[in-house]
Image: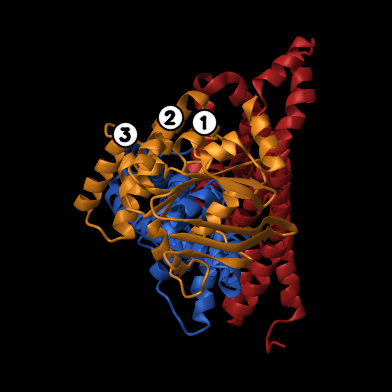
Chain colours: A red, B blue, C orange
Amino acid sequence: MFDTALTTADFVFLAKGAGMTIVVTIISVIAGTVLGIVFGVIRYQLGAIWAAPLIFVLDIFRSIPLLIQLVLANAFMGTILRLNMSGFTVACIVLSMYTAAYCAEIVRGGIEAVPATTRRAARSLGMSWGQDMREIVLPLATRVALPSWIGLALGVMKDSALVYVVQVTELLRSTQILITRLQEPLLLLMICGAFYFVISFPLARFGGYLEKRWSND
Amino acid sequence: MFNYTFQWKQAMARLPQMLDGAVVTMQVAILSMVLGILLAIILTMFRLSGIRILSAVAKTWVEIARNTPALFQIYMAHFGLGSFGLHLSPFLSILIGITFNNAGYLTENFRGALKAIPDTQTRAARSLGMGAAGAFRHVVLPQMLRISFLPMTNQMVWAILMTSLGVTVGMNTDLYGVTQDLNALTFRTFELFALAAVIFYAITKIVTLGARLIAARLFRY
Amino acid sequence: MIEIEHVRKSFGQLEVLKGIDLTVSKGEVVTIIGGSGSGKSTLLTCINGLEPIDSGRILIDGTEVHAKSTDLNKLRRKVGIVFQQWNAFPHLTVLENVTLAPRKVLGMARAEAEEIAVRQLTHVGLGDKLKTYPGRLSGGQQQRMAIARALAMSPEYMLFDEVTSALDPQLVGEVLDTLKMLAQEGMTMILVTHEMAFARDVSDRVAFFHQGVMAEIGPPQQIFGDPQHPETRKFLSSTRQ
């Protein structure tokens, strides 16, 4: 169909890039979500005033370009702390914090969406704070938060395209390397775009479906 | 504490150059937002037109914008259009890439906003003798933009952050590009990029605060 | 003159208008009463072409509403309608709500449109609310604004679709007073209402709708005093309680 210089080896190269995209995404989303839940609960418990320092720090991750976060973290680990840290590790740390910053807001929103009356009812039945959180808040907040969380996870996958800046060769970087070598930008970009799309589109649809279903009842 | 001497003065000396870069960054962001909003309004009308081809165009645009990395979209503008013999300057590549992204996300936001406007508003406008276009323009559109104001502010912040991707297609006049070039000269990577980060942070805060003030003035109902 | 001839209309399987015939002359006030689902509101939205009809025809001053060649936007300038839900435009002030259509549809200059709007708003008792946004008004005030908005187009006919049904009881009176005033001024009106005392008071003729059919029509004294159709009697006795 296409008259192309693309070889099997090139496809393997792209597949490796895609694998890297997925690995970085999964690690960062898991670590970021755990951190985000912790931050989100702290943020909720402390209230806007006492949590101000936390809010400020998390907001930074949402207010400066990810590219700069990666460069700064890399320089900080390398030239300042003189740690011999791989680009992969730096990428995962930064993306995890980046994920956590957004996730904390989602978690807080989820908790706040649980009506106070419901929680009072739980506590009035003699449930402890922990039981209330586990049995009442967690299931209800999850409903509110899950669709946004899916969106966040997909966002992290897309944004992981930027970790090239700390020498991690993920899918888009692999594509760019091949573009430079083979001079077939359109075909290569279409393969690359299709990969992201095939993962993101159905999951985003699923998130939208959940949101619709849960907001109706 | 660290075995490293910070050279903040050296970085600060470059502040004027970096602020010039920040101006270019804002130009790209504002232009991409204005164009993005206009395109999103057009795409929204495509969606509502009931003409299958037009709504398919809108749908495809929205889904590609939302389901691929912004950097991919910028590459498409730069390398993709390049393979059709359309070689764009870095400035145009980044502008088109971000505009494409903005338009896609904003169209989706507008879709949500339209759901919040009851059909009876259009009905009331039509009953006063307005045509479909007039009802949309005078009654639905202003309310849609009002409801979408917060998402638009968020998208503006995104647009500002996305300008940093221009460096990948050879842009070197924006804040990130300038910082990168200065870094190549001085190797004060941490100091320079920390300064750039502070500028980005300040810009996004000014934009969100400004938007809030505008909203308070603009929407008094 | 509004001429309604054998109008039929279905929503899917459900036939809501089963051949309606009704002629309303200039200056006449006709009230339509009937239970819910009797098709009375649907008829109003058909008259100004907001809803298509399946068969029959509706003529306004000889122009067929549902003919392809009819410019509905032009026709609607002649026929104002006010809905149960007042549908204020929330992003516009009261004055802007009323001037919007005269300016954009009739192409009036702002000053001229405002003059008319102020007159109409004063007429319905909202002369002091010009710069207010509808969100700050009560339901009754918003409904009166909607009436002024329709009147500002200088329509020759006015349709009122249960305009007091969504209002709190204590706000119904002010809107009914406005309607009464219009009727006394000689406006041609078709009203759908549940306010029986008002219907008796203001109408030249009252029509009773039952399951998509106009079961009975006549002067208010006859309809309320001596109803002929068994369903009319049933309906009126149920509303008296």
What distance separates the C-alpha of mark 1 from that of mark 3? Answer: 25 Å
Residue at image coords 53%, 37%:
C221
Residue at image coords 72%, 70%:
A13
Q: Is residue A181 above or below residue B38?
A: below
The reply to whether the C-beta atoms of the residues labelled 2 and 1 are less than 8 Å apart is no
* Residue tagged 3: C126
Q: Nearer the viewer, residue C176 or A184?
A: C176
Where is residue B161 drawn, in percent x and y?
46, 51
Where is residue B183 drawn, in percent x and y?
41, 55
Q: Nearer the viewer, mark 2 or mark 3?
A: 3
**Which residue lies most toward the left here?**
C111
Q: Is residue A7 left or right of residue B143?
A: right
What's the residue type where badge 3 is placed?
A: Leu
Q: Is residue C148 above or below residue A159?
A: above
Q: Chain ID for label 2?
A: C
Q: Is residue C97 above or below residue C64?
A: above
Q: Chain ID for label 1?
A: C
- Mark 2 and mark 1 on one chain: yes
Q: Give the structural element (helix, strand or loop) at label 3.
A: loop
* Residue tagged 2: C138
* Residue tagged 1: C197
What distance separates the C-alpha of mark 2 from that of mark 1? Answer: 24 Å
Q: Give the structural element (helix, strand or loop) at label 2.
A: loop
Q: Chain ID for label 3?
A: C
What's the residue type where badge 1 is placed?
A: Ala
Q: Is residue A203 above or below residue A62?
A: below
What's the residue type where badge 2 is placed?
A: Ser
Q: Is residue B75 visible?
A: yes
Q: Could you tell which of marks 2 and 1 lies nearer the N-terminus? A: 2
